[in-house]
Amino acid sequence: MATKKTSKELPGGCVSLFGLPFLAGGIVTSWIYFSGYTDYMKARGWEEVPCWIESASLENHSDSDGSSYKATATYHYEFAGRTWQGDRVSCIMLPTTSAISNRTRIASSRNT
């Protein structure tokens, strides 16, 4: 006996198409966080060496949505007979608060 589809059932293709953007967003978000985490885990095994900090600052960005802060630094160190320079402060690079606020404001203005 054949089963009759009711009009309330959605075909599998529509549900799959609806879920694809959410799946893609989840994959991208996971990649961002896991890449920072794997860098952190690799760095735990590095040999500690002295470094010389050339500059360090905390940048303050203010606008109508509030303030956000970003740590910046430049430094150099010696390892394996060579001098290395760097400016990376964190293993995980996250968007600033103002960047998130700007995206939210833009999305809100498109909906009105």
Image: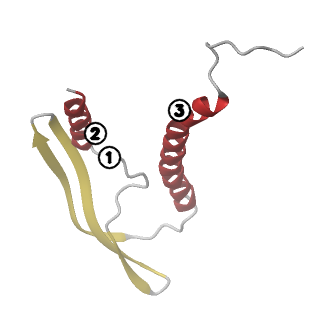
Which numbered tag is attached to residue 18? 3
Amino acid, disc 3:
Phe
| Residue 109 shown left or right of residue 12 in the figure | left
- CB atoms of marks 1 and 2 within 8 Å: yes
Q: Quadrant of residue 109?
A: top left
In the rendered structure, which disc, 3 or 2, sits on the residue that comes first in sequence? 3
Q: Would you call the spot at circle 2 few (<14 residues within 10 Å), some (14-19), or many (20 or more)? A: few
Which residue is disc 1 drawn over?
Answer: 95
In the rendered structure, which disc, 1 or 2, sits on the residue that comes first in sequence? 1
| Residue 72 shown left or right of residue 25 in the figure | left
Element under disc 3: helix
Element under disc 2: helix
Residue at 52% over, 50% down: 31
Which numbered tag is attached to residue 100? 2
- CB atoms of marks 1 and 3 within 8 Å: no
**Which of the two residues, 21 or 44, is positioned nearer the viewer here?**
21
Amino acid, disc 2:
Ile
Residue at 54% over, 49% down: 34
Q: Is residue 76 above or below residue 82?
A: above
Task: Find the residue positioned furthest to the right.
Answer: 1
C-alpha separation, residue under disc 3 versus residue under disc 2 = 24 Å
Q: Is residue 21 above or below residue 112?
A: below
Residue 37 % position (x, y) = 52, 51
Task: Find the residue positioned furthest to the bottom.
Answer: 81
Residue at 59% over, 29% down: 15
Amino acid, disc 1:
Pro
C-alpha separation, residue under disc 1 versus residue under disc 3 = 27 Å
Q: Nearer the viewer, mark 1 or mark 3?
A: 3
Residue 11 % position (x, y) = 65, 26
